[in-house]
Amino acid sequence: MIRGLYTAATGMDAGLRRQDAISHNLANVGTAGFKREQVLFQSMLDREIYRYSSSAPPAYLGLIGAGVNYTLGAPDMSAGMPLRTDSPLDIALIDSGQATTFLAVEDAQGQRAYTRNGQMLVDGNGYLRTIAGAYVLGRTWAGGAERLRVSNPDELRIATDGTLSVGGARLGQLYLVNPAADATLTRRGDSLWQIDGQVQAVVDPHVEQGYIEQANVQVVKEMVNLIAAMRNYETHAKIIQIQDETLNKAVNEAGRV
């Protein structure tokens, strides 16, 4: 009976985590380049049940579950739909094949990070930044990275290979990379990602100026999942209530007999 309380409690805990992930997805439906979170569930170690008797060997009855466990799965990196903005400082990164393209940036601490959010601006010093303030990096001829400066944002032209130019004068090329297949992606906030593992230059980049990539969140689907998660949570809460009432009767009523 006590085991039933703990089993139902694991279901409530997993349900809360699923609701948190869905709420996070819905909250970022308007964030350019956002990739939805996914929660994975698995059963805890099942236990074998036997019936014991003094006149017969133990009889195997089956398995009983010990609850459910959860973990934050790999983000859904499927591409979002492009949205036309006609802003010269907006770009959408179009993936080639199964590889996901990222734009390299430099965060406030001077560390390398990566983003899919193509909304950019030019600061007072002429540096190209993301909407969250990170410096947009360009690839040097030697293969390194440097901050990009734009003299006249209104005349900025960005070619499909990421080359920036103003009035025909080349300013640099966006630092675009693909993470290796075994690399780990970690969210850092402000639409930034940390890539643990190898990255390589995009062989055939495809950049669309005047577009942004919308979040790959389907609102209706997420709402349906949220309702299902809430009902699942309520079911486990009801199970705990039933278990508690049964335990109360066992202690206060059956115990008197």
Image (cartoon, grey):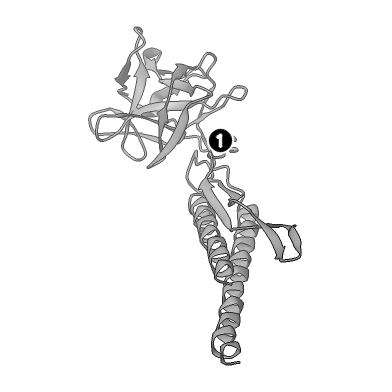
As drawn, 230 above or below 139: below
Question: Which residue is depicted at the point 54% across and 54% down?
Answer: 22
Q: Nearer the viewer, residue 257 or 115?
A: 257
- Tell me if residue 118 can be seen: no
The picture places residue 158, in percent across and down from the top left corner, at 45, 22
Q: Residue at x 70, y 60 (%)?
A: 50
Up the image or down, 24 lies above or below 82; here it is below
Graded by Cα atoms within 10 Å as few (under 14), some (14 to 19) or many (20 or more), the crowding at tag 1 reads some
- Nearer to us in this view, 144 or 255: 255
Disc 1 secondary structure class: loop
Foreground of the two, 185 or 224:
185
The residue nearer to you, when weighing 238 against 175, is 238
User: Left or right of 191: which side holds 25?
Assistant: right
Find residue 197 and report its image quarter: top left
Looking at the rendering, in which quadrant would you find the N terminus? bottom right
Seen from this angle, which residue lies furthest top?
Answer: 142
Q: Position of residue 18 (x, y in %)?
A: 54, 55
Residue in the picture at 56% in, 79% down: 244
In the image, taking residue 157 as reference, residue 226 lies left or right, namely right
